[in-house]
Image: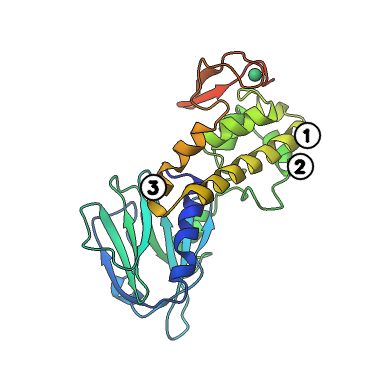
């Protein structure tokens, strides 16, 4: 499943290239998670603005000649990828949305079709407002501090790993990144959220940021184009300290890495380095 770093690298892969292009045609394939919400023809002759990311959503502003605003909110779902190409070729069976512009075509390929391309008059109206409203802070937002995390965790009684995964305190801490951040902060993933001290929340907030920054740096350095974004999690995993390493010795203390299931997801941790 594409996580925040993959989505950000995808955004960077086409943002500058498509910025300022004019839409010349739109092709809609099989239904995605939600309907487009606008007649495809109404997108034609609009100008593409600067693509932005919020959580795992991308927002592509499309300005009409008469100055009317609006844009497309896009999500990659479980299996989607977005590619910008000057010569995309014929749409295949899994290509469900093409935004054809004067500079090239932005194409959504999504075999499982949990992805979405949805129109809104602005980011703060309609479907976009609805889908973005429950999201937690961006991990690189200066407002995401230990104090913020501490205050938010105080109101939860669930395990801290599940609080991170929920995405309503901070976005981007998907399973692999949550496991790694908890390891580098020395926190047992099963610790109840409201029992974490302020200093430990400071360490955890920093660890979440650092972990995602490392994933992004890895993506930026190893990806040749959008297709590689699919393999990003795998490449990050190759460098992971605990994720996927059940039974292997901890890199710090050599105790075997343990695996437990939390909220139907695997959690990997070192019971010696990570304390409740
Ligand atoms: Zn250890």
- The residue that label 3 is drawn on is 77
Residue at 46 percent across and 63 percent down: it is 126
Estimate the spatial distance between the alpha carbons at disc 2 and disc 1, rounded to whole Å: 7 Å
Secondary structure at numbered mark 2: helix
User: Regarding ligand 1, which quadrant of the image does it lie in?
Assistant: top right
How far, Cα to Cα, is label 3 from label 1? 34 Å
Which SS class for mark 3? loop
The residue nearer to you, when weighing 165 against 24, is 24
Quarter of the N terminus within the rendering:
top left
Location of residue 65 in the rendering, given as x and y in whole percent from the top left corner: 42, 85
Quarter of the image with the C terminus in it:
top right
Asked whether the residues under the numbered discs 2 and 1 touch, taking CB atoms below 8 Å apart as contact, a structural biologist would say yes
Number of residues whose C-alpha sits closer than 10 Å to that of mark 2, classed few (under 14), some (14–19) or many (20 or more): some
Real-space Cα separation, disc 3 to disc 2, in angstroms? 32 Å
The mark nearer the N terminus, 3 or 2, is 3
> Mark 1 packing: few (<14 Cα in 10 Å), some, or many (20+)?
some
Q: Is there CB contact under 8 Å for labels 3 and 2?
A: no
- Residue at image coords 34%, 55%: 34
Does mark 3 have its CB less than 8 Å from ligand 1? no
Disc 3 and disc 1 in contact, CB within 8 angstroms: no
Q: Position of residue 263 (x, y in %)?
A: 49, 27
Dot 2 corresponds to which residue?
A: 147
Judging from the image, the colouring scheme is: rainbow
Q: Which mark is residue 198?
A: 1
Q: Quadrant of residue 104?
A: bottom left
Q: Is residue 25 left or right of residue 199?
A: left
- Nearest to N terminus: mark 3 or mark 1: 3
Which residue is pictured at 65% across the width and 42% down the height?
210
Which residue is drawn at the image coordinates 39% and 47% (left, top)?
77
Q: Position of residue 143 (x, y in %)?
A: 71, 51
Q: Nearer the viewer, residue 107 or 240?
A: 240
Q: Residues within 10 Å of mark 3 (few under 14, many from 20)?
A: many
């Amino acid at each position: 499943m594409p996580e925040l770093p993959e989505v950000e690298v995808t955004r960077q892969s086409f943002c500058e290239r498509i910025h300022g292009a004019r839409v010349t045609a739109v092709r809609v394939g099989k239904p995605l998670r939600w309907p487009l919400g606008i007649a495809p023809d109404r997108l034609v002759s609009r100008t593409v603005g600067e693509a932005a990311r919020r959580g795992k959503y991308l927002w592509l502003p499309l300005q009409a000649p008469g100055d009317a605003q609006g844009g497309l909110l896009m999500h990659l779902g479980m299996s989607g990828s977005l590619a910008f190409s000057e010569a995309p070729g014929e749409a295949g069976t899994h290509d469900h949305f093409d935004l054809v512009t004067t500079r090239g075509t932005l194409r959504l390929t999504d075999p499982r079709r949990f992805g979405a391309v949805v129109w809104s008059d602005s980011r703060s109206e309609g479907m976009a407002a609805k889908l973005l409203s429950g999201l937690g802070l961006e991990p690189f937002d200066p407002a995401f501090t230990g104090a913020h995390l501490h205050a938010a965790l105080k109101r939860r009684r669930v395990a801290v790993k599940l609080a991170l995964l929920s995405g309503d305190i901070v976005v981007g801490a998907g399973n692999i990144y949550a496991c790694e951040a908890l390891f580098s902060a020395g926190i047992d993933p099963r610790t109840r959220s409201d029992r974490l001290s302020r200093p430990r929340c400071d360490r955890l907030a920093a660890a979440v940021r650092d972990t995602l920054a490392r994933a992004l740096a890895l993506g930026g350095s190893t990806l040749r184009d959008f297709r590689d974004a699919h393999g990003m999690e795998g490449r990050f995993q190759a460098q992971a300290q605990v994720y996927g390493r059940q039974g292997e010795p901890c890199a710090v203390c050599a105790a075997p890495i343990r695996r437990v299931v939390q909220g139907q997801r695997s959690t990997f941790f070192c019971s010696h380095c990570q304390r409740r």
